[in-house]
Image (spheres, helix red, strand yellow):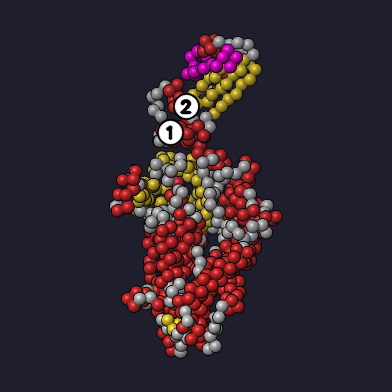
Amino acid sequence: MTAIQVQDLRKTFKVQKNREGLKGAFADLFKREFQEVTAVKDISFNIPEGEICGYIGENGAGKSTTIKMLTGILVPTSGSLTVGGYVPYLEREKFVRNIGVVFGQRSQLWWDIGVIESFQLLRKVYRVSEQDFKKRLDELVERLELQELLNRPVRKLSLGQRMRCELVAALLHNPSILFLDEPTIGLDIVVKSEIREFLKDMNRQHGTTILLTTHDLQDIEALCSRVIMLDDGRIIYDGGLEDLKQRWGTGREVIFQFGKATKLQQLEHWTEGMPVSWSAENDLGAKVWIPLDLNVSDVLGRVVGQADITDIKIIETNTDDIVRSIYKSGSAEKPDESADGKDEEEVIHV
Amino acid sequence: MSSLETKKSGRKLLLGAYIDFIRIRFLTMLAYRVNYYTGILIYSLNIGVNYFTWKAIYGEGGSAGAALGGFTLTQMTSYLAVSWMARAFYFNNLDREISTDIRDGSIAIQFIRPYNYVMVKMMQGLGEGMFRFMLFMIPGMTIAMLLFPVQLPTDPTAWTGFLVMLFFSFLINTQINVITGLSAFFVENNEGMMRMKRVIVDLFSGLIVPISLFPGWLSSILKLLPFQAITYLPGSVFTGQVKGVGIWNVLGIQIFWFLALLIPMVWLYHAARQRLFVQGG
């Protein structure tokens, strides 16, 4: 079953143009000028039930706008979408009972009342029976360790505590689809990993479909089997995270520290005939770039026997670098194959 | 069968949630009740200033029972007192709350919940109204009676009529507030509209000057507008200007406006959904 189906989805906003200066402001009084801004440009994707999908892109790429259309908040300009069997904006009130939403930047709890009172109110809003509610709440409270927080007013919670409560609030009615818009923003590492663990468990135990946007790629690495990458309102990559790494991660880097001064020419001489490239900061340290199809151990073998090595570090291109370079180039197409290794390296590591 | 039952109990739960919104707002207001003690003082001062102004206008004739626009001085005083105290009940800041929700983008949170946003807002307004009724209007009225020659109606129909109409005052005023608040969807800054609305409601509802004292042409225009239904009509019932069958007529006017204002309110809400632009991405 497909949980989320999106076809040629588009959202255009009319934005008021403010003309410059006093004269412009005066002209604006009488005739406003509008500018059309297309935030999401004909995107299509399907997310099967039970998948955790990461939705990433730079600020202003259109992530939040998509999430807001998927959750029924915004009405799309054109295109079709079905989420959990509903067209979100048409049957909003029925539809939202099957989804949970967490906006990392906005609270959905009521500021002035106690946490448990907020939950009770949500129970009624979502029409959850007393038994189901109790069972579910106990489970969530225990899992997220909220026991002491329940009677506190929301305004007295720390961000980490609040975010855990937000998750409970979004899950009390046992939604089959969960939307998370930057759920780990501003949280410390401990809370972040707690939340990731919790989400993984949720997905495993209840088969909850999760779509999350984030700027923290560790969220993606920890949770998502699939990534959709957005740039300027268009999807530029849709597929597995591993594929992305393999397509973009063009090589590894090994950093050597030497006990005795070792010249760059010497190093190059040892690895002669290999498509590697060396660079050195001084005589006691050097870096070598090794393309993917070459074994690191082969290169190491040639160096280790000859030089006096005090330390070796192997660095794989990490996701951050990959994504950064994709954002920069604005396309997930792999750089030109014919270009030689050195150029590629520069594209990726700059 | 069972699905019908779950549907029914579901609806009951949602109703329970709406009632909770009244309760929670009431309790929140109670937590900040100290703010309201100053409110009572300000309203009493307003009544006092108006009372002495009118006393001066009536002059010598006041104590002799001369009438202005159908009001004797005693009736005018009672009208003033009850109008200000009624305002304590029907007044709320829903317009500001709604436009803040829209402008800071927290409206998004409202739309992911399976309830009607406008309905929730009205319930919160009612919770606020009930708080003000009990902790503001009743003690305030008592104080006003001690300070000024206010005459309470002796006829029980005037009392029931007034209380029913007071509730409709709340509904109509709240509808106007919701409409003003929702306009923030369409104009970037509706601050001016909110201020204008406030002045118009206070002036045209007859809070400051009873409608019958406006010049003929203006008062006949005002009688075609919904504002008089907020203060002037219930005030007239309370002071005995309108009696007997007349109460049904003025109640009918209120009900008419309540129904008529539903149309722009619902239309605006739906139009707003189409062009909703959530601020802050």
Q: Position of residue A229 (x, y in %)?
A: 45, 41
Mark carried by residue A328: 1
- In three-dimensional space, the C-alpha distance between marks 2 and 1, rounded to whole angstroms, equals 10 Å
| Range of residues picked out in magenta | A269-285
Q: Amino acid at mark 1?
A: Lys
Q: Is residue A34 above or below residue B4?
A: above
Q: Is residue B188 left or right of residue B170?
A: left
Outermost residue toward the front? B60
Snapshot quadrant of residue B195: bottom left
Q: Is residue A1 above or below residue B60?
A: above
Q: Is residue B247 above or below residue B31?
A: below
Query: What residue sits 45% from the left and 40% below the top?
Result: A58
Query: What residue sits 64% from the left and 57% below the top?
Result: A153
Regarding residue A227, the answer to whether it shows in the image is yes
Number of residues whose C-alpha sits closer than 10 Å to that of mark 1, classed few (under 14), some (14–19) or many (20 or more): few
- Which residue lies under the disc numbered 2? A350
Query: What residue sits 50% from the left and 46% below the top?
Result: A213
Number of residues whose C-alpha sits closer than 10 Å to that of mark 2, classed few (under 14), some (14–19) or many (20 or more): few
Residue A271 in the magenta stretch? The answer is yes
Outermost residue toward the right? A148
